[in-house]
Image: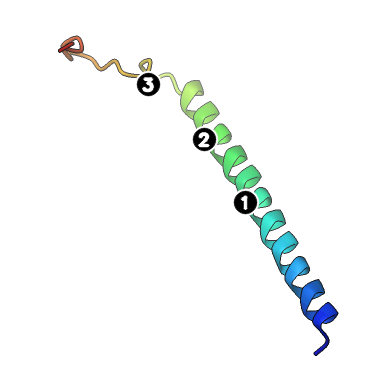
């Protein structure tokens, strides 16, 4: 194989990997957002702010 053909294949593989990674990230983000929206619409669940749990003692500082 010619060196230019190998170079083109490596560039194509790199661009393909980057594109697939970005696409996977977008799809994962959409799935998580839909899941969170569905949880927020449920009336029988209360989502507490980050770091707060019912009955938990306040954070300790050292």
User: Disc number at residue 44?
Assistant: 3
From this view, report whether residue 50 is shown above or below residue 16.
above
In the image, taking residue 23 as reference, residue 58 lies left or right, namely left
Q: Position of residue 28 (x, y in %)?
A: 57, 45
Query: Which element carries disc 1, helix, strand or loop?
Result: helix
Q: Sequence order check: which comes first, mark 2 or mark 3?
A: 2
Q: CA distance from mark 1 to mark 3?
A: 32 Å
Residue ID at (83%, 86%)? 2
Q: Which residue is mark 1?
A: 24
Image quadrant for the N terminus?
bottom right
Q: CA distance from mark 2 to mark 1?
A: 16 Å
Q: Where does the image place residue 22, in percent across and percent down from the top left?
A: 67, 49
Q: Position of residue 12 (x, y in %)?
A: 77, 68
Mark closest to the chain's N terminus, 2 or 1: 1
In the image, taking residue 33 as reference, residue 58 lies left or right, namely: left
- How crowded pointer 3 is (Cα within 10 Å; few <14, some 14-19, many 20+) is rated as few
| Label number found at residue 35 | 2
Q: Are marks 1 and 3 in contact (CB under 8 Å)?
A: no
Left or right of 26: which side holds 58?
A: left
Tell me the mark number nearer the camera, choosing from 2 and 3. Answer: 2
Q: Residue furthest front?
A: 3
At horizontal 81% and vertical 73% (from top left) the residue drawn is: 8
Q: Secondary structure at mark 2?
A: helix
The first of marks 1 and 3 along the sequence is 1
């Amino acid at each position: 194989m010619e060196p230019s053909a190998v170079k083109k294949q490596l560039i194509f593989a790199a661009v393909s990997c980057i594109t697939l990674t970005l696409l996977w990230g977008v799809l994962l983000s959409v799935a998580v957002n839909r899941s969170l929206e569905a949880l927020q619409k449920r009336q029988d669940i209360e989502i507490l702010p980050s770091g707060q749990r019912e009955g938990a003692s306040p954070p300790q500082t050292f």
